[in-house]
Image (spheres, rainbow, N blue to C red):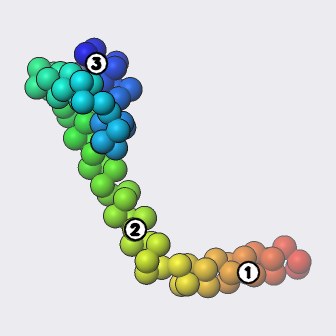
Amino acid sequence: MLCREVKRFVYFFLDGSLGEQKRQDFNSHLKLCPDCELRMRIQERLRNFMQSRFARLATTAPDRFKTRLTRSMRAFRTEWSR
Ligand SMILES: [Zn+2]
């Protein structure tokens, strides 16, 4: 596998939606290529971070968030109608 292919496949790899054969190619490339391995780790961390943020937002914040949004919309409208 080439570096540009690894770049293209990294999302699928992290999703687990890469085929078995491709995943093996991917893994053996990572062992040989520190650049791609690093890139993959960064993507993985970013992805985990985003997922945990979204999960928390979806379970704990919606009401507070909505209230804040409504309030700032109202403030915005007041600003504009002056
Ligand atoms: Zn590479």
| On screen, residue 75 above or below 14 | below
Q: Amino acid at mark 3?
A: Cys
Q: Position of residue 11 (x, y in %)?
A: 36, 37
The residue labelled by disc 1 is: 75
Secondary element under disc 3, as helix, strand or loop, is helix
Please give the name of the residue rendered at 89% of the width and 77% of the height, measured from the top-left corner. 81
User: Rounded to the nearest whole Å, what is the CA distance between mark 3 and mark 1?
Assistant: 50 Å
Q: Which residue is mark 3?
A: 3
| Direction left: furthest residue | 31
At x 48% / y 79%, what residue is drawn? 61
Q: Nearer the viewer, mark 3 or mark 1?
A: 3
Question: Residue at 81% of width from left, 81% of height from top?
Answer: 78
Q: Are marks 2 and 1 in contact (CB under 8 Å)?
A: no
- Where is mark 2, residue-wise? 55
Ligand 1 neighbours mark 3 (CB distance < 8 Å): yes
Q: As shown in the figure, which amino acid type bears the numbered disc 2?
A: Ala
Q: Looking at the picture, does residue 22 appear above or below residue 1?
A: below
